[in-house]
Amino acid sequence: MKIPSMLLKRMYTFASLRNDAEGCRFSIKNRLADAVLYKLIEVKIDGQAIDLETITIQLEDSTRIMAPKVTRDNPIDFPIRKVLHVRMGGLKVATGKHKISLNFESSYGALSFAVEDSIADRPLDRVTVPYDKENDYAPKAIAERRKFIEEFGNGTLEHVSQYSFDPELLRGNIENFTGVAQIPIGFAGPIKINGEHAQGEFVVPLATTEGTLVASYNRGIKVLNLSGGVKCTVAADCMQRAPVFIFEDARAAREFKIWVDENIEPITEAAESTSRVAKLQYIDTYLAGKFAYLRFNYETGDAAGQNMVGRATFAACSWILDHATNIKKFYLESNLATDKKHSQVNIMRTRGKRVIAEAVVKREVLIQQMRVDPEGLYYHSNISNVGAMLSGANNNGAHSPNGITAMFIATGQDVANVAESSAAIIYSELTAEKDLYISITIPSLIVATYGGGTGLPTQRECLESMDCFGRGKVKKLAEIIAAVTLAGEISLGSAISSLDWVSSHETYGRNR
Amino acid sequence: MKIPSMLLKRMYTFASLRNDAEGCRFSIKNRLADAVLYKLIEVKIDGQAIDLETITIQLEDSTRIMAPKVTRDNPIDFPIRKVLHVRMGGLKVATGKHKISLNFESSYGALSFAVEDSIADRPLDRVTVPYDKENDYAPKAIAERRKFIEEFGNGTLEHVSQYSFDPELLRGNIENFTGVAQIPIGFAGPIKINGEHAQGEFVVPLATTEGTLVASYNRGIKVLNLSGGVKCTVAADCMQRAPVFIFEDARAAREFKIWVDENIEPITEAAESTSRVAKLQYIDTYLAGKFAYLRFNYETGDAAGQNMVGRATFAACSWILDHATNIKKFYLESNLATDKKHSQVNIMRTRGKRVIAEAVVKREVLIQQMRVDPEGLYYHSNISNVGAMLSGANNNGAHSPNGITAMFIATGQDVANVAESSAAIIYSELTAEKDLYISITIPSLIVATYGGGTGLPTQRECLESMDCFGRGKVKKLAEIIAAVTLAGEISLGSAISSLDWVSSHETYGRNR
Amino acid sequence: MKIPSMLLKRMYTFASLRNDAEGCRFSIKNRLADAVLYKLIEVKIDGQAIDLETITIQLEDSTRIMAPKVTRDNPIDFPIRKVLHVRMGGLKVATGKHKISLNFESSYGALSFAVEDSIADRPLDRVTVPYDKENDYAPKAIAERRKFIEEFGNGTLEHVSQYSFDPELLRGNIENFTGVAQIPIGFAGPIKINGEHAQGEFVVPLATTEGTLVASYNRGIKVLNLSGGVKCTVAADCMQRAPVFIFEDARAAREFKIWVDENIEPITEAAESTSRVAKLQYIDTYLAGKFAYLRFNYETGDAAGQNMVGRATFAACSWILDHATNIKKFYLESNLATDKKHSQVNIMRTRGKRVIAEAVVKREVLIQQMRVDPEGLYYHSNISNVGAMLSGANNNGAHSPNGITAMFIATGQDVANVAESSAAIIYSELTAEKDLYISITIPSLIVATYGGGTGLPTQRECLESMDCFGRGKVKKLAEIIAAVTLAGEISLGSAISSLDWVSSHETYGRNR
Amino acid sequence: MKIPSMLLKRMYTFASLRNDAEGCRFSIKNRLADAVLYKLIEVKIDGQAIDLETITIQLEDSTRIMAPKVTRDNPIDFPIRKVLHVRMGGLKVATGKHKISLNFESSYGALSFAVEDSIADRPLDRVTVPYDKENDYAPKAIAERRKFIEEFGNGTLEHVSQYSFDPELLRGNIENFTGVAQIPIGFAGPIKINGEHAQGEFVVPLATTEGTLVASYNRGIKVLNLSGGVKCTVAADCMQRAPVFIFEDARAAREFKIWVDENIEPITEAAESTSRVAKLQYIDTYLAGKFAYLRFNYETGDAAGQNMVGRATFAACSWILDHATNIKKFYLESNLATDKKHSQVNIMRTRGKRVIAEAVVKREVLIQQMRVDPEGLYYHSNISNVGAMLSGANNNGAHSPNGITAMFIATGQDVANVAESSAAIIYSELTAEKDLYISITIPSLIVATYGGGTGLPTQRECLESMDCFGRGKVKKLAEIIAAVTLAGEISLGSAISSLDWVSSHETYGRNR
């Protein structure tokens, strides 16, 4: 992977400067790309060069090395997201602000940093949930935490503490691990799907504690299966990060938009240098006041991709900051992404997968199974449209987030994305045969079959039960989820519609 | 509990008529209130009275009783949500539609029903996830389902099948139970809260598979604790169901609204007759076209209350249907509730708890801990406001649904309510002392400490770790969740703001 | 009219302190209620009492009176919205800030004011559009302005300067009057209306410069008339002002809401003391952070009422400020009114008139006149619903603001209220006879038949052409406007639908 | 101008078939492009060829020509938007449906049409506003209409009937012209603008009947001028039409989107063939269910351009319909345009001009002139943001539609576009010098300086007073309007903020 040189000087962040038993220390985190350090040239504190002989370097949990020992023949690998600790023996820094500078020879040439940091004037004496710096996923660390929680809080963690896997697996998935939530899973289905990626019948894991949810989806699935199944389509696929650039005035912001469009190639190159997977599709620029909000849209393969696009956009912005003129300020995120939020921009321009499930529900099936006719369901859907307009709702359907959430929990998705994934557009019409055509469009379904929580034990098993684990499966999963939500719409829609009280009890002779 | 007599004739639903080995049968479900049946007076099919001697009655899993054996001295209890099976020995009904009528003498006087039902003309030959009619939560039923899933789907359910509790506990929480999702829990905190219900320090269970989430909330908690903690307030509390009544024209709908306001007392009485807990606060009526949408607002105690308000509203609507004139159609739900959806009506008029967390974050703490000053965080919040306006987002903050979702999963909430609970309004200002006042308003946080999934083993333990299980605790839980989300806003907001790239590197001398 | 005493001390505003030829002066504007001044007790500037003999008092354009001449026997009337000038002969005040205090004996007892004001240090030398302090509506003043505009700007105002009325009429309607815009009016109709207030046939004045607009509405009117006319209903009527009260914390804001509900009687009394017309219906309180947003809802008779409710709310807030505790800050408006803006709160809770027009459009009429069948129009309306959801539009219909705006201009409405009045909800369905039921709900139509521009010459004639001028006519006008918009929806909807290209040209044999 | 051949057969619409005194007739309207007819080859009714000798052809108000007389040497011009009448002497058609076909030799080669039309079976006997077929703008026609309105309605049209221009000017601007609305105009300013198109000082015509509006804007202008004026920028410029294409399923809709992107060149060529001005910028495609909504974005020069883009999009769609496969249905508009509606898509992606006005308001000027300090105004703007979020408003400012509407009326804009133009985003911040930076972004300001009502007498004079009439002026006008709205925000914002009641009267010592 080639890294644009202009990224290098911004690829690290400093962790805090502090005194310790041996002297003082500070830390650097690699934010952007794997690097190799050949030599430490110089360290200065407040302009004063520090004797390199007193300095040790340590990559996270590896062993410490004396600074002069780092050479081209004995380099230090400095991979992305790792932290490098720099300790200066025998040196104590006073309370207050200090300037630190640092020079390396590296696989990218000379790297130099400068930062101002400060030392707090009193030690913090806080009670916190115990954390074990050596190995926080070891049984001892977990047991200590459990003990703390049971003593500090109330009650025991008897059930929470029972899990069937090695906690080491959780590195990268959670901090302060103490146990598990056991969420009951019921399987629904099989549901018959005619997708481009999901074809055939699938059993569906639903993790929920809400009674009747599995039964309700199952009823809808029955109706769909008897009507020939569900057709599913992934219409778009993109994940966003939306930095904002701030200028002197609106005119400069507008010129910047034009400049970005003209420089889309190197920007794309910078963005895509950070991952083999992330592909920049396009950038939408939204102008307001003296701000240019850039919404970067990426394909992210089988990962949901929020972190991947964060890194890619950071790299792209670094290139921009080096090449554009007149930028006054910059933030990597501006609330236009719009991560973990419902938004109209998601509905319009997709976030995650835009997936559509369609079916023609047979008239007789609907009547037999759900005791409602297509006209009744259709009439109610029009009433619901007005209800959604009155309420300003992000979904004119009945309850698609129920199925989505239950599948998200079961399959290791980032469940907070229910915020975005809760949006849906239901459309139905009566066919010439008086059957019911119905579709659900989920414009911002955020799913993964790789990365995040998808590889954890129960989550992976649930994905595998649908043959949806791993690479090349994410659109299949999106199709299955969409199909299931459609089943749920038919089920709850019918339940509501069959309670349709008519004025003339005589006409229908039905008491409910 | 007194049941208004006009409810009675609508208190049941019929399950389907079908032939079985012994003859034919149909079923009635009690939807509304506990009843006692003293005597079966008459059963007619297609106008033809059936010999009562051939009829047996069976309450769900209880033993069957010959119809004539049911007397005042030997009555049948018919509790709410139970199903009563009526079997007619030796009678086969033909394919097609049939009229059934039924008369009982009951604790509410004479009850009579009439329904039209039909018999399907061919048996369904579908493969479905196995279900055991006798006891679907027994080890045998679960094992059979596991076997089916492992064979029908792909892979095994080795981890899914490991749980630490008796599945019988899950009755009412899930159908087709097959195992559990094990979601890792990390504890954050303790967080210092100055609420009206939550007072003191609380450890916080976060169930998530997203790396850094727990760490990020913990950082925010540290900042808040060092600033003196979080002040929390539950500003409103209500749960909705929104039926729609359809009229000849808009004028009749408007007159109906006036009628409802005039009859609020008996409507309230009817609604509240269904539960000791649900209290009707008020009804908002929204008029559009010839429709009157009624949004019933209830207090629901420590339950989230969606089902409770459904029953109460059904009872209220039954009273309305009996007393109002000119209603042409009626649906129990109209999309104005707006269950499992973000909506502006939720933001404006609350759904679940409207809870606010506030803090004055000390300038020095922010700078020391987060490397950002109050001005920077504040500036970014204004940029985010514009971003939210441009995108039409339901949240001008950073990521409150992350913490909410993690706590919802851990504590047995209905996680699909993240759709509603994702809305938030962040407001910040600089104090005279140049500290940062910041508040988050969550207008539709839907939580429970009783009912639903809250009583399941790990969920209850998590609630107990915060002393939030059971009655009288729901506002305490709401306050804790709000406090935690505020911590997350400070943490992520600071992370974004500290990446604030300034044009003049010289000025600040910082490489990031 | 009784004025609550606590209002009195806030009933005035000071205009600016300045030096003039004779000495110095300042002015007071009466904002709230008619008063009578019996005696000037004391005037102090910077704590220094001014000799009353050097002071003159002048009510706007009346004659000046020496301060000692004002007595119980010779009082000064000080009506609402008038300005009182206080001049101090022979006294010059220095540049910078000064404290002024003032004591009167009045019909409300002792009144005392104190204000700090400042004197600008240099005269402004600005070119401005000429303004004549003596009589700005006199021909001379107007002619001078015309001359200035023609010279300063480009071209002449030949046509602008031609109007058929005495400009004196415009006092209170416009400042810097220079001429008129001549907007062409076309009449459409007559349209047949079956309203509660508008009954019969009405010709409709449409002021527009958009070709085909009148013709298009006329086509729709023809269809409606041939179908039996339009049924109209005013479903609600309210006008708002939304002050915000700011507290120490959210808890205080919530307590304030409760306090407001408990004190609704005196608050209502204070609000209603300012006008014979304005009636306070109810107050909605919206809580967010430490803010309590109060949305006051009033009936305002035949006026649109924005000013009326401003005064009433100011009076109510004055009472509140005197009686409530812990209020930190207060603004009379908070953006929740939401004047001159589309908003969801307007759609939900009405602003101005909530008016609904309905019709059953006959199948044959639609086909004959518009070359579209009901199914086609209906199908398109469902497509439009999805379009509105995708776009986040405030109107799922075709173009209701066209007709509304043209009638607003013709009839002297506050045309900027098109912002609110642009919202609409269209609902249609096919009847059993395959005719088209269609309704439009305009939730925030802001109209007047009294006050504002309604009494100006052409505006009044247009109102009178529909017998809609003056008191008791406002709901009639609302009904007529709604009926006309419905005509426009049918007309444009049909035009779009008849362009419905079908895949099989053969089937229909039509080239378009 | 080259017309793509595939457009030709769709370039006309038929007007209705009917019997008249001489026989029967039908009409064709040219919708798309100027053509020349060389010869009428054949006319058939119900498959029966009509003797050409009995046929006459007449272009609107021109003289009739016998069909055989039309030859290459004596062709008929058939310009766009004109109607051609075809009369068949001596032939009466029966009530009911008839097939008509027609063949021409033309400047575009052979043209043939076929249509099915029907004859109504009874004459309509409706009272309507009189219309003169010969010349509806002649004094006689206008006088007759006036008489009708005065008799049918109530009162007179004395003032309405007074206008200073020749009604012939109104052809294309209004139908059924009867007189004018005289809307008073006040001039504000001059306002100092530093735009790219508007540079210098401008007087501003405001047509309104709302007292204080002109004065209020004038106050804001004074503040801005004293602060150095307003900087204005047009950030984007586009006008939309949004057809919808309907498919068998979502997959076909998605493939169509790809196809559109691939065929953007010929689609653009087709669209741009209809006008010298309209330039297609790009097409946004929004997918939902089986629908592909295409939002065409055009530059439209100095016209607002709604009609222009309608024709262009119609041409583009004709090309699409001829070349794409599988389209089931098509509508030229889908509610995504979103004409005459507020929408989030307008805010995000511009409609008309996206224009921004900015200023740094000097602290001392604000205090001196408006009696509010920058902190107060700024604080209130943050309160208003929360208010806008709570209410779901399309504008977080005070009242920008007031100024926009007044200028729209004065300058001959399509005033109904206030619906779109009402959206605005206000952003303010305190500068290092404690002045107030404030900007307003109007994302969908729809203005013209050419076409529509801009050329009418008073409207043109008002445009000319700002040197904004005609070609090349539209962005100048947009900048002036934006500058004026900013003045209004400062004026009303200050008025509200200066009423900021503080709890401690002592601190400020001010009574208001």
Image: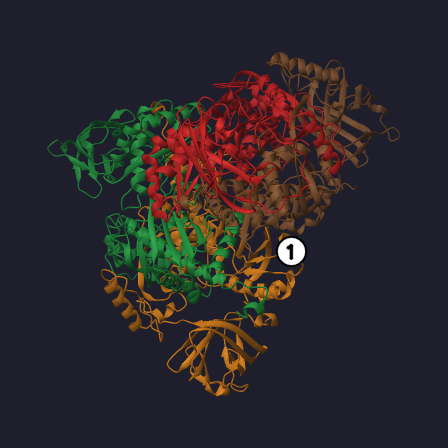
Chain colours: A green, B orange, C brown, D red
Q: Chain of mark 1?
A: B
Report the label total: 1
Q: Residue D346 location, x and y as percent?
A: 47, 35
In the picture, the quarter occupied by the N terminus of chain D is: top left
Q: Residue D306 location, x and y as percent?
A: 50, 31
In the picture, the quarter occupied by the C terminus of chain D is: top right
Would residue B375 be visible to someone looking at this image? no
- Amino acid tagged 1: Ala
**Left or right: where C458 falls relative to B448:** right
Would residue C18 be visible to someone looking at this image? yes
Q: Residue A459 location, x and y as percent?
A: 28, 56
Q: Height in image: A492 above or below D406?
A: below
Q: Height in image: C120 above or below C427?
A: above
**Left or right: where D452 falls relative to B501:** right
Q: Height in image: B391 above or below C252?
A: above
Within the image, what quadrant is residue B158 found in?
bottom left
What secondary structure is found at the residue carrying circle 1? Answer: helix
Are there few (<14), some (14-19), or many (20+) residues within 10 Å of tag 1?
A: many
**Left or right: where C378 falls relative to A160:** right
From this viewpoint, which residue is outermost toward the left? A73
**Left or right: where C458 falls relative to B306:** right
Within the image, what quadrant is residue D183 found in?
top right
From this viewpoint, which residue is outermost toward the top? C151
Q: Residue C208 location, x and y as percent?
A: 61, 30
Q: Nearer the viewer, residue A194 or D154?
A: D154
Q: Which residue is mark 1?
A: B252
Q: Nearer the viewer, residue A216 or A377?
A: A377
